[in-house]
Image: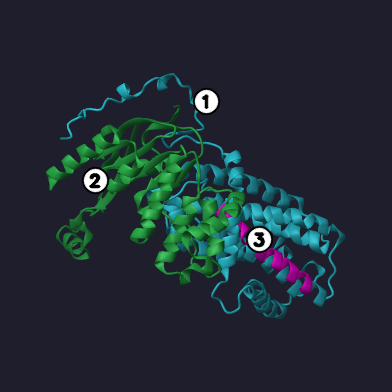
Amino acid sequence: MSLIIKVENVSKQFYINSLRPRELTLGSTVMNALKKPFTRQPLKLKNEVLWALQNISFEVKQGDTLGIIGGNGAGKSTLLKILSRIIKPTSGRVKLRGRLGCLIEVGTGFHPELSGRENVFLNGAIIGMKNREVQKKFDEIVAFAEVEKFIDTPVKFYSSGMYMRLAFAIAAHLDPEILIIDEVLAVGDAAFQDKCINKINEVANEGRTILFVSHSDGALHRICRTGLYLEHGQLKNFGEMKDVLGQYQVDYGKKN
Amino acid sequence: MFTNYSKDIHPENLSIESDKISDEYFSVIIEPAGTWRNPNWAELWEHRELFYFLTLRDIKIRYKQTLLGITWVLLQPTISTIVFSILFTNLGQSKPLNVPYPVFAFSGFAVWIFIAVAISSGSSSLIGNPNLVTKVYFPRLILPLSAVAANLLDLFLGLISLTVVMAIYGVTASRTLIFAPLFLVLCFTIATSLGVLLSAINVRYRDVKYILPVVLQLWLFVTPVFYSLDMIPEETRWIWKLNPMTGALGGFRAALFGASFDSFEIAVSVVLAGVLTVLALQIFYRMEDSFADVI
C-alpha cells in the first residue's frame, strides 16, 4: 500500500500572553502608583511558551485507519488542525497525497436565518464538496438526517437534534481520499450516534484513509486499525490499535 | 497484560522506504509559516463555488429581519442626497458638471455608499466568521472577497435608481457612458484591496473596528462626493487629486455626464489602486498563517 501522509518532526508552539495577576486589578495598580509615583508601572506581558506538539513523526499508508488518543491537552486537536492546514506547524513538515476532508466540527458556517436546503449547499461548499456532488447526494443527505419535512424551514427553528443531524449528514457525504474526523461528530441520541459510527465505518471499509480522534474505546476498536498515542505533545506510542489502546488504558488507570 | 509496546519511539525506525519518495509524489506540503508569497490563483479558482455560496449567503442575510428589507439600499443614498440638496441649494452651488445638484449628489452617493459599506463589511469578514477560520481550511482570501462582492448588488440597484433620478430631472447620459464601467471597476478595486487589507489587520488589532467608521466619514468629506472639485480653490486642488477616490469618482461622473476627463487625477487613482492591491495581498498572505492562532 502506498504512502499517503508523511509527518516529519512536526512541532507547534503557542504563546500564552498573560498579565501578571498582581497587576490585573485596578486597586493594586493605583496603590503601586501611589507608593512609587515616579517609577513606571508597565503592564508586563509574560510570554509563556507552550509546546502543544514536539517532534512528531509518523506515516500513514493509503487505506489505513488511524485512531489518535491521548488525554486532554495532549495535542490531538493541534495535530488534526495542522494536518488539515488550519494552522501552520512551528517547525517540521507534513506531506499529503490526495484530497483531504476535515471534519473538526459539524455545521461549520451554518447560518440560522437560512433554510436547511440553503445550508446544505453552503456547508457542502465550506467543507470542500463540489456543487454537482451536493446536488447528486442532496436527497440522500436529507433522508439520512431525517429532516425531509423541514428542509425549507430556516434552521433557527430546528431542534438542536435536527440541526446536528443535518450537519452530520452533510459531513458524512463528503468523500475525499483522506478524511480527518473529530469525535465530537458523533452527535444526537444513542441510535443516531450508532448510525454515525456505522457511516464512518462504511467509509473506512471503502478503502479510504481515516484519521479519527476519540475517547471512546468502542468506536476506536470498531473503526481504527492503527493507533497513535499522544501525551503532553509527544508521541508516546504508534502501532497496532489494540496495543496502543492497551497502554493508554494502563496509563489512564494508574492516574486514577 | 498490555506489555507489548516500546517506551521510546524512534521515528526513523518507522519509516520504511519513504525517505526515497520525492516531494513531487505528494499533492500538498505543509510547512512552517513565514516567507512572502504570492496568492495561489489555481487554489482560489478551485474554490470559486465556495466564493459564490458565501457571497449568496451575505446577500440573503443582509436585510433579514428588517422591516424595509432591500429598500434600505435605495434609502441610504436618497436620504443623503436630499439632505445635501437642501444644504447646497442654499449655499448656491446649483449646477456642478452642468447637471442639477440632486443628480450630481446621487451619482456620488450611489458609488460612495457602495465603497464605504464594501470596505467595512470586508474588514469584518474574518473576525465575523471565526468558525470558518478555526475549524476548516480554504483560502482565507475568499472571505473578504465574497464580503465585498456581496455589495455589488447594492451598487447595481443604486445605479438603476440613478437612471430613475436622471430621468426625473431630464438628464440624459453622455455618449462617453461606455467608459463608466471602467471607473466602477477602479472603485471596486480600491474597495476590495482595502477590505482585504483591513480584514487581515483586524484579526490582530481589533482597533480597526473603532477607527474605520471615523476614517470613512473623514474620507467622505475630503472626496468630491457631494461637492465638485470646482468649489476647491485652484491652488490646492492638486491635494484633492492625490486621493484615489477623486479620480475614480471624477472619471465615473465625467463619463456619465460628458464632462472632460482629468488625466492626472485618473492616473493617480489607477496607480494607487494598483499599489494598494499588491500591498493588501502581500500583507494578507503574510498574516494569513497566523489567523487561526490569534483570531
The residue pinned by badge 2 equals A71
**Which percent across, then down, holds residue A241?**
29, 36
Of B46 and B193, which appears nearest the observer?
A: B46
Instruction: Of the two numbered discs 3 and 1 on the same chain, state the one appearing first in sequence.
Output: 1
Task: Give the magenta range.
Answer: B144-165
Q: Check whether the beta carbons of the residues at disc 3 and disc 1 lie within 8 A of each other.
A: no
| Colour of chain A in the image | green
- Tell me which chain the residue with mark 2 is part of: A
User: What's under tag 2, amino acid-wise?
Assistant: Gly
Please check the rendered image and state whether residue B157 is part of the magenta-colored stretch, yes or no: yes
Q: In the picture, residue A5 is in which quadrant?
A: top left
Q: Say yes or no: labels 3 and 1 on the same chain.
A: yes
Distance from disc 2 to disc 1, alpha carbons, whole Å, reads 36 Å
**Residue at the spot 82% in from the left edge and 69% down from the top edge:** B98
- Name chain B's colour: cyan
Q: Residues within 10 Å of mark 1 (few under 14, many from 20)?
A: few
Give residue A188's position: percent from left, percent from top: 37, 61
Task: Nearest to the eye among marks 2 and 1: give it.
Answer: 2
In the picture, the quarter occupied by the N terminus of chain A is top left
Is residue B210 left or right of B251 when viewed as pictured? Answer: left
User: Do the residues under discs 2 and 1 have CB atoms within 8 angstroms?
Assistant: no
Q: Mark 3 to mark 2: distance in Å? A: 49 Å
Secondary structure of the residue carrying numbered label 2: loop
What amino acid is at disc 1? Glu
- Residue at 43%, 49% in the rendered image: A199
Circle 3 sits on which residue?
B152
> What's the chain of the residue with tag 3?
B
Could one spot residue A86 in this view of the protein?
A: no
